[in-house]
Amino acid sequence: MSTDKSARPDEEARREFWTFHMERSAELLQAMQQQPTEESGEGFASIPEAATAAGVEMWFSESKIAGDLERIFYIRESLIPDLMAIGRDMNDRGWILKIEDGYRTQEMQTQLGRKPAVFDMIVRTCQWESGGEKPTLDLIKRRSTCLVANYPNVGTHTMGAAVDISVFDRTDGAEISRGKPYLEMSEVTPMDSPFVSAQEQQNRADITAMMEAHGFLHYPGEFWHYNKGDSLYHLVTKSGEAAPYGPVHWDPQTNAVTAFDDVSSPLTPPDLLATLLDEALARIGSDSP
């Protein structure tokens, strides 16, 4: 992402939209933290096994998170039928649902926010947002909350209630374009980004309609993220009910879940975040031509 202040005539408009979107996401996640959660203890089920059993053509990411973390294609058991219905609807339309990510452990979520492959992206984006200037630690803290769920009570993946997705054409295997492939971190990232084509906006809308027809609501901050049953879902739907899914540790051997002891402390504390910022700036500087 360019940090040249004169890079494009619409550069400032893109930056303004990004900042507006990030602050909007921050407000949404702050409200999410106030939603009550009463962990149900519901276990997990394998998405690939369910797709095979249901005869649904579904793809799964073969990459690792931040380069070396194995993905866990599991989700809460009661969400499986809805996900299979979505996959079937997409097959009927001539599409294939690809699951990019599912449940993340606390360790995975923590490492995701610290890995240079991801953290450098956050720093570069904040640097661009700041007009090419060195981003402040406060800005990095705020953006890390939105971009990598640095607080457990806003991390729907650790709740086992979210999937990140892409969609492909069943005939030729071409991706149904939404502006950029998963995983993107730019002004194109918000679901309502005006910086994608009309067709790409329509693709986002059509995919979202199919997901939401079975209760998986979109997160406005990311065009690939959908969730159901967690505190964000109950906030958006104004259900007035406590969310049954909170951040949990999961034992694959027993399928038992245990709620996090602490959901309100940052996974990466401010002092470590400051160190990571210095290290990232050194790397980014050394990458400059």
Image (tube, rainbow, N blue to C red):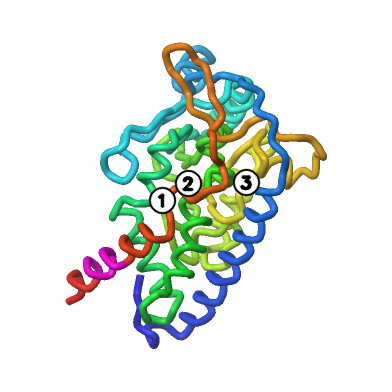
Say if residue 181 shows up in the picture: no
Q: What secondary structure is found at the residue carrying circle 1? A: loop
- Residue 282, relative to residue 203: is it above or below? below
Q: Position of residue 140 (x, y in %)?
A: 44, 65
- What residue did someone put label 1 on? 183
Which mark, by number, is residue 31?
A: none
Q: What secondary structure is found at the residue carrying circle 2? A: loop
Q: Position of residue 265 (x, y in %)?
A: 52, 48
Identified by mark 2, the residue type is: Ile
| Left or right, residue 194 beside residue 40 | left
- What residue did someone put label 3 on? 218
| Left or right, residue 171 beside residue 151 | left
- Residue 76, relative to residue 158: is it above or below? above
Q: How far, Cα to Cα, is label 1 from label 3?
A: 16 Å
- Residue 50, relative to residue 82: is it above or below? above
| Left or right, residue 165 beside residue 21 | left
Q: Position of residue 209 (x, y in %)?
A: 67, 43
Quadrant containing the N terminus is bottom left
Comes first in the chain, label 1 or label 3: 1
Q: How far, Cα to Cα, is label 3 from label 2?
A: 17 Å
Quadrant containing the C terminus is bottom left
Judge the density around disc 3: few (<14), some (14-19), many (≥20) Cα neighbours within 10 Å: many
Looking at the rendering, the stretch of residues picked out in magenta corresponds to 278-284
Identified by mark 1, the residue type is: Leu
Identified by mark 3, the residue type is: His
Figure quadrant of residue 272: bottom left
Figure quadrant of residue 106: top left
Q: Inspect the magenta stretch and tell me whether residue 280 lies in it.
A: yes
Dominant SS in magenta: helix
Q: Inspect the magenta stretch and tell me whether residue 77 lies in it.
A: no
Which mark, by number, is residue 176?
A: 2
